[in-house]
Image (spheres, helix red, strand yellow):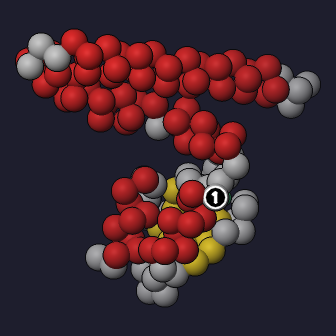
């Protein structure tokens, strides 16, 4: 596995959607497109998104594309990965409780609450703005 593929797999769930395995696809980590527009080609070791047209072939480019998303896209990422992010925080909470570290427990609980609020606010926004599409 190339370093680029490792970096991509850390934040994108890639599926093999091509018959011959020429590319893998998943939800784009850069834009709001809900489809599986993000693709990675193992043969060429490059990524490309059909929605936002971001493309590259190095870990550095992938990271810079990821870090230069709009602020809303940052929150979108939280929304679509909320279970994963909360799941990552749970072991920290568990160990903080074991150590009886009240300050850390509070910090984690406040962070989890905040993330849940961000995610549900965005879901509400989706429901409101999405209603324009329905006839
Ligand atoms: Zn995109």
Name the residue tied to disc 1. Answer: 68
Q: Where is residue 85 shown, x and y percent of the image?
A: 39, 34
- Residue 37 sits in quarter: bottom right
Give left or right: position of 2 versus 101: right
- The reply to whether residue 38 is visible in this rendering is no
Look at the image and tell me in which quarter the C terminus lies: top right
**Toward the viewer: 18 or 67?**
67
> Which residue is at a point 34% across and 75% down the rendered structure image?
3
> Which residue is at a point 8% across and 19% down the rendered structure image?
99
**Toward the viewer: 61 or 23?**
61
Give left or right: position of 29 versus 91: right
Q: Where is residue 132 shown, x and y percent of the image?
A: 88, 26
- The reply to whether residue 71 is visible in this rendering is yes
Q: Residues within 10 Å of mark 1 (few under 14, many from 20)?
A: few
Image: 87 above or below 108: below
Element under disc 1: loop
Name the quarter showing ligand 1: bottom right
């Amino acid at each position: 596995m190339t370093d680029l593929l490792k970096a991509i797999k850390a934040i994108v769930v890639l599926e093999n959607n091509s018959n011959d395995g020429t590319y893998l696809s998943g939800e784009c980590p850069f834009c709001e497109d809900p489809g599986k527009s993000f693709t990675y080609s193992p043969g060429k070791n490059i990524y490309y998104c059909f929605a936002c047209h971001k493309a590259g072939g190095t870990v550095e480019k992938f990271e810079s594309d990821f870090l230069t998303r709009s602020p809303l896209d940052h929150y979108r990422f939280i929304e679509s990965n909320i279970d994963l992010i909360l799941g990552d925080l749970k072991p920290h909470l568990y160990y903080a409780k074991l150590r009886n570290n009240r300050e850390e427990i509070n910090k984690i609980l406040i962070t989890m609450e905040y993330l849940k609020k961000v995610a549900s606010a965005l879901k509400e926004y989706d429901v409101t703005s999405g209603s324009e599409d329905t006839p």
